[in-house]
Amino acid sequence: MSDTRLDVGRKASLWQRIKDIALTDVGTLVRGIDEASIAELERLLLESDFGLDAALDLVDDLERAAQRGEVKTEPQLRERLADRVREILLEPRGEGDARPGQDLRWPAEGPCVVLLLGVNGSGKTTTAAKLAHRARVAGKSVVLAAGDTFRAAAREQLETWARRTGARFVGGQQGGDPAAVAYDAVESAVEGGEDLVILDTAGRLHTHRGLLDELAKVDRVVGRLVEGAPHERLLVVDATSGQNVLVQAREFGHRVPLSGLVLAKLDSTARGGAVVAVARETGLPVRLVGTGETPDDLEPFDPSRFVEGILGPA
Ligand SMILES: Nc1nc2c(ncn2[C@@H]2O[C@H](COP(=O)(O)OP(=O)(O)OP(=O)(O)O)[C@@H](O)[C@H]2O)c(=O)[nH]1
Ligand SMILES: [Mg+2]
């Protein structure tokens, strides 16, 4: 399985490969799609990390459409597939009814508190910097809080971003309690009338109970200071990490009610099938995407563009 997966990036685009299975031969479609083509299409979708449920869902839909004569040509097949994937991506609603592609939801009053979480190296700190930069450009005051108290380098990384973006930095003692840092950051932001508090946290494996408890504590503590906080709980996932994203979304989501996903490093992959699986199976909306390493590289998630990206050139 892993070998096939590694090969995917080097091979032709998903659409090129779908065309290769002769499924799109007009004659085949008019006669009805044969079982071998169906199995092959399913395999391609699985290889591209769509996950079993989404892959079966898509294949069933195409088969039905072909039987009804709604799909007879290659362009029609592509359009149908793209439409259905877009629908899957547009369905989810996160906590508080957050929608796909929706920007940060600012409360009517007080600072907006954003909690960023995710596994090691997924892109949390960079996303924190990007969010800070955007808010600064829009004229808002921003606090960047270093909830990663394990690594001195993590603190320095965030502090550097705070300097560059013009945000105020709040950090704690090394090895200190991240909940205390979060408390300080939010409390001082309330006192100072600041607009946005971004809580960066240490990467943690979704399997590590103690660390997930710690996150839940950070979450609770800020909720006591500001009503409705954190207003966003965004799981930052590495777009290149395939099916693992699904497990992460489930496990983190069990601990804190997530309001959406940030898909980081989308510039580094064309294999976004896992996002479709996550949307379908966890009901989490993708809110923002990271498209590079600079503070400007953050965009609202656009399902249509995303689908074109995973299918590849027509
Ligand atoms: N190409 C690309 N690289 C990114 C993007 N976002 C983050 N990175 C890179 O990914 C690496 C890890 O990013 P961090 O933001 O430090 O990740 P993290 O989740 O804070 O990591 P930990 O704190 O160690 O858990 C860095 O080299 C970033 O520059 C993105 O959207 N595109
Ligand atoms: Mg970090």
Image (tube, grey):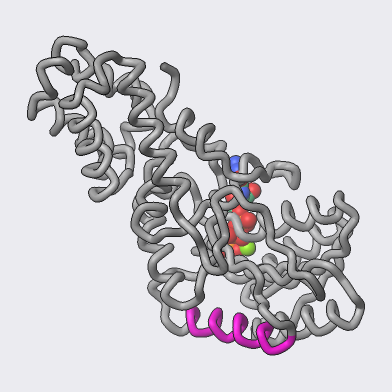
Quadrant in which residue 267 is drawn: top right
**Residue 294 location in percent, x, y?**
72, 43
In this rendering, the count of numbered labels is 0
**12 lies above or below 304:** above
**Residue 117 location in percent, x, y?**
56, 67
**272 lies above or below 34:** below
Viewer-side residue, 198 vs 102: 102
| Residue at x-position 38% and y-position 73% | 207
Q: Give the range drawn in magenta.
A: 211-225
| Residue at x-position 79% and y-position 51% | 134
- Residue 121 in view here: no
**53 lies above or below 157:** above
- Magenta stretch: residue 224 in it? yes
Viewer-side residue, 227 vs 195: 227
| Residue at x-position 12% and y-position 22% | 32
In this view, the residue farthest toward the front is 68
**Residue 146 location in percent, x, y?**
71, 72
> From the image, which quarter does the C terminus lie in?
top left
